Amino acid sequence: MAKPLSFRSYLASAYSFYEEEKLIELDCSQPQTCVNAIVKGVKKKQTAQGDKLMLKLKKLLDYIPRSFKGWERSKMQKLFHRNFLQSVCMHLYRNDPDIDMDRIMKMNKFRFHKVDPV
């Protein structure tokens, strides 16, 4: 017996994405008050773009569709994916002006592997 195909989750996420885009557009079209203009001029600390990319990659690696119940990545796959993330870390953070690699290594539980000279 074939399972019915549902696109509900995809449509819901697409709707929420476009709704958020429209709300941002509407917010930008509102006239600014003097206080808002001053506050907007103050430099704010933003989340590093690399942190966002790392989080997105982790979510994608952990994602398993609901139709695949009981499936899980093996320990070897998890180790491979962690090492992969560590190896591409500098590429993910390349557009961030101030990166603290020690913080990134601790945050992602990466290990520094010493290479013995041959």
Image (cartoon, grey):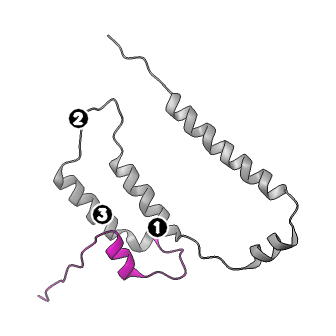
Q: Which residues are magenta?
A: 92-118
| Looking at the image, residue 90 lies above or below residue 71 | below
| Looking at the image, residue 3 lies above or below residue 114 | above
Task: Determine the image quadrant of residue 85.
Answer: bottom left
| Amino acid type, residue under disc 2 in the picture | Gly
42 falls in the magenta region: no
- Give percent across and percent down for residue 108: 33, 68
Circle nearer the N terminus (2, 1): 1
Task: Determine the image quadrant of residue 88.
Answer: bottom left
Mark drawn on residue 84: 3
Residue lying furthest front: 35
Quarter of the N terminus within the rendering: top left
Residue appearing at x 24%, y 38% in the figure: 71
| Looking at the image, residue 23 lies above or below residue 81 | above
Q: Nearer the viewer, mark 2 or mark 3?
A: 2
Is 93 or 41 nearer to us in this picture? 41
According to the image, label 1 marks what residue?
Answer: 51
